[in-house]
Image (spheres, rainbow, N blue to C red):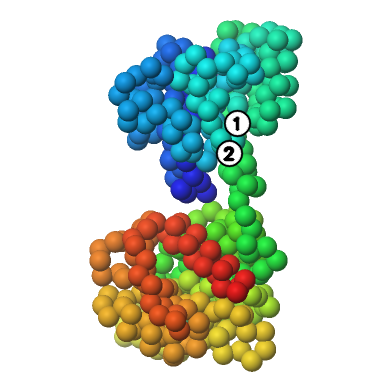
């Protein structure tokens, strides 16, 4: 969700600082890059070592540090981020921000940044309600700082009221929504049809033939297209993945159901066939469970499944303007991809090299070539999320041309 986003997290000195560690973890789980600045007060509650271990980056604490300034000046620190998050934002640090003070690294970075700032206040209720704090909060809002929380509840000081820092999960969601709203939507007004996952081809009511597709790549593509503003129909075989946000999902089992769902979803501007569709189904599915009766072993005979990619690409009416297939090869990737492009009648093939031990099946990374009529692009090894984002951008560029 936050793949490739860079968060500069400013941790100020309050007991809620321990929950900033959970926040770092939650942001990292969403694959954001997190870099921390800690005030001296924050270090009374949590150590820079803990923040460094969880963020996987060094932690910055000193304004007047010769080494810090030489390696990463406070100006660069304040600019190399997509969003600056202050959590917890104490009454003291917000007062400094509102007044424009810059007497330590945290306040200086906040004054020097050219990036949006989100503050998550945490303090005692009386301190929150104090007219001075409320004045500062109003000033910060007027200055364009996004405010999240504080929540009401039991406070560490034993009092009850408003003053708890928002839950880390709520902060992550707010960050995602904030960054999403600030990205451009080059696929707005487009309809993307995506197939994903394996298909299950029944043998009898309790058995089926399947394959190892996890659906990660197809689901990531659906999510990436939705993030760029497309209306997305995701036709998915059985997978163990959460439904991607902002996507209409049609759940199917067999190849024939998948084809019917795809045809029902037309018209679409682009079809991306990432599903690992079973090439064959059992010719005659048994109506009742096959039993071990001590006699001859059962034999299965097969019938060919419809090729969804080729069917969509061959349509005379309502053919999506761009039809994209996937190929998994263990050698001669480009040669086979070119042949597949011609055989299936599609426009682009995203060819996976599954020979490189990258764990493409079920793994998080992918090494791909994009093969189209104009030539072949060799993409560096990236995560499936990055492949999805890159492909979605390429689709947007193609449809706009
Ligand atoms: N595909 C499809 N319907 C099928 C089979 C495949 O839509 N019945 C699509 C897949 O979603 C993918 C591409 O076609 O986009 C893969 O083609 P396929 O012929 O299955 O290729 P591989 O299995 O990779 O290769 P090959 O059979 O050439 O070994």
**For residue 397, which quarter of the picture?**
bottom right
- Residue 241 shows up from this direction: yes
Q: Secondary structure at mark 2?
A: helix
Disc 1 residue crowd, few under 14, some 14–19, many 20+, Cα 10 Å: many
- Residue pictured at 46% horizontal, 30% vertical: 75
Q: Position of residue 348 (x, y in %)?
A: 47, 79
Q: Earlier in the sequence, mark 2 or mark 1?
A: 1
Report the quarter where the C terminus lies: bottom right
**For residue 165, which quarter of the picture?**
top right
Closer-to-camera residue (282/367): 367
Q: Position of residue 332 (x, y in %)?
A: 27, 80
Marks counted in the figure total 2
Q: Please indicate whether residue 110 sits to the left or right of residue 213 in the image.
A: right
What residue did someone put label 1 on?
A: 118
Q: Identify whether 90 is placed above or below 2.
A: above
- Residue 206 shows up from this direction: no
Residue 175: image tag: 2
- Residue pictured at 35% horizontal, 35% vertical: 56
Q: Please indicate whether residue 218 sits to the left or right of residue 122 in the image.
A: left
Query: Is disc 2's CB within 8 Å of ligand 1?
Result: no
Closer-to-camera residue (400/159): 400
- Residue pictured at 56% horizontal, 36% vertical: 115
Q: Are marks 2 and 1 in contact (CB under 8 Å)?
A: yes
Give the alpha-carbon distance from disc 2 to disc 1, as whole Å: 8 Å
- Residue pictured at 54% horizontal, 31% vertical: 113
Residue 131: image tag: none
Q: Secondary structure at mark 1?
A: strand
Q: Nearer the viewer, mark 2 or mark 1?
A: 1
Closer-to-camera residue (233/46): 46
């Amino acid at each position: 969700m936050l793949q490739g986003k860079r968060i500069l997290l400013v941790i100020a000195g309050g007991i809620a600082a321990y929950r900033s560690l959970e926040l770092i973890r939650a942001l990292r789980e969403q694959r954001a890059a997190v870099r921390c600045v800690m005030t001296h007060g924050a270090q009374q509650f949590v150590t820079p070592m803990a923040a460094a271990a969880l963020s996987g980056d060094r932690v910055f604490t000193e304004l007047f540090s010769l080494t810090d300034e030489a390696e990463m000046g406070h100006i660069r620190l304040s600019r190399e981020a997509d969003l600056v998050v202050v959590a917890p934002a104490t009454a003291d640090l917000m007062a400094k921000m509102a007044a424009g003070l810059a007497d330590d690294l945290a306040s200086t970075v906040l004054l020097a940044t050219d990036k949006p700032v989100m503050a998550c206040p945490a303090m005692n209720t009386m301190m929150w309600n104090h007219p001075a704090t409320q004045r500062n909060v109003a000033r910060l809002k007027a200055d364009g700082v996004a405010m999240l929380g504080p929540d009401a509840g039991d406070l560490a000081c034993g009092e009850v009221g408003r003053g708890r820092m928002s839950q880390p999960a709520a902060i992550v969601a707010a960050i995602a929504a904030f960054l999403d709203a600030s990205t451009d939507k080059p696929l707005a007004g487009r309809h993307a049809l995506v197939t994903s996952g394996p298909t299950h081809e029944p043998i009898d009511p309790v058995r089926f033939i399947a394959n190892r597709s996890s659906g990660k790549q197809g689901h990531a593509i659906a999510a990436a297209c939705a993030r760029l503003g497309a209306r997305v129909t995701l036709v998915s075989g059985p997978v163990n993945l959460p439904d991607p946000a902002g996507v209409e999902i049609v759940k199917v089992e067999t190849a024939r159901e998948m084809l019917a769902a795809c045809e029902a979803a037309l018209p679409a501007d682009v079809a991306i066939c990432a599903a690992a569709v079973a090439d064959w189904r059992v010719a005659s599915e048994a109506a009742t469970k096959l039993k071990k009766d001590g006699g001859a072993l059962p034999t299965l005979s097969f019938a060919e499944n419809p090729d969804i990619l080729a069917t969509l690409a061959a349509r005379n009416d309502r053919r999506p303007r761009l039809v994209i297939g996937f190929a998994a090869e263990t050698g001669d990737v480009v040669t086979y991809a070119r042949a597949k492009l011609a055989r299936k009648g599609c426009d682009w093939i995203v060819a996976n090299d599954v020979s490189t031990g990258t764990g493409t099946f079920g793994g998080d990374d992918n090494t791909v070539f994009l093969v189209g009529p104009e030539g072949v692009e060799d993409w560096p090894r990236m995560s499936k999320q990055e492949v999805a984002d890159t492909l979605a951008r390429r689709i947007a560029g193609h449809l706009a041309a």
